[in-house]
Image (cartoon, rainbow, N blue to C red):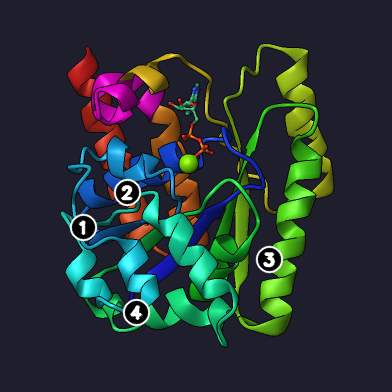
Amino acid sequence: MAVTIAVLSQKGGTGKTTAVRTLADVFRRVGLETLAVDLDPQGNLSDYFDLPPDAEPTIAEVLGGSRPATEAIHDDVIPANLQLAEAELALTGKMGRELTLRRALRGLGDGYDVILVDCPPSLGLLTVNALVAADHALITAEAQYFALQGVEQALEVIDLARENLNPDLNWVGVVLNLADMRTVHSREAYQSLADAYPDQVFRTTIRQSIAYAESAERAVSILDYRPDLGADYLALARELLDRLGLEDASERVESLAGELAGGRR
Ligand SMILES: Nc1ncnc2c1ncn2[C@@H]1O[C@H](COP(=O)(O)OP(=O)(O)O)[C@@H](O)[C@H]1O
Ligand SMILES: [Mg+2]
């Protein structure tokens, strides 16, 4: 049975899509069958995985009920495009609108160990759908003064999902992204999260680098493009897998980190 993780934040540019893309990559390399679901009409995740822009059906048809999720899987990714914005509008007036993704993904879990859902940069109906479908919520926060505020807003929506529709939803943690821990600015952002949520903030922070935009443009994983930076995601994956109780996989990530570091020398 797959463990489903929704990656969310209340705004764009906090590294959600990069996190889903890279964590999926790490998980696959250690033998975890991983499905990545793009739930953002911008379709960035689909681009980062280099899926053809006309790959069909997409998550829009799945949420609209015209196609089953199994048919929308392309190379272990369910893509999205602008049609998802229309599908979201069409959902708005429907009964059970918050449960649509959960129902659509039901049954897929048998074929996968992990399902990662990349949320859009807002806390609206699509993100609520992800949270209702998920076992765990992972928040990304940009290393800025407003990081804490963004996390608090995301937490309110997690609480709503939990109170109304998904009582077992677990907040698995918050990761500080695009960080430069040499600066006071980033260190203060981290400290504000650590003070407020000492048990949830990941020790690992993801360093800021232009290499991420470059690797995204080339649809190459940061693990291959810049293994030295990819080490951040390997460390994050280990912490995350430990929190999920998947210690075996976490140990395999440690071996992978050794291999990638060895390849660099
Ligand atoms: N650690 C990082 N350092 C610098 N830029 C990053 C980092 N992670 C992602 N980016 C870049 O920032 C932009 C937004 O990242 P993305 O993952 O798409 O965020 P979101 O999905 O939250 O909008 C992209 O251009 C991406 O390549
Ligand atoms: Mg995104």
Residue shown at 52% from the left, 59% from the top: 243
What's the distance in space between the residues labelled 2 and 3, CA to CA? 22 Å
Q: Secondary structure at mark 3?
A: helix
Label 4 sits on residue: 65
163 relative to 178, above or below: below
Q: Quadrant of the N terminus?
A: bottom left
Q: Earlier in the sequence, mark 2 or mark 1?
A: 2
Element assignment for label 2? helix
Circle nearer the viewer, 2 or 4 = 4
Report, in whole angstroms, how far the alpha carbon at label 1 lies from the one at label 3. 26 Å
Query: Which SS class for mark 4?
Result: loop
Residue type beneath disc 3: Ile
- 247 left or right of 16 in image: left
The reply to whether the C-beta atoms of the residues labelled 2 and 1 are less than 8 Å apart is yes
Residue identifier under label 3: 158
Residue located beneath label 2 in the image: 24
Point out the stretch of residues depicted in magenta.
215-230
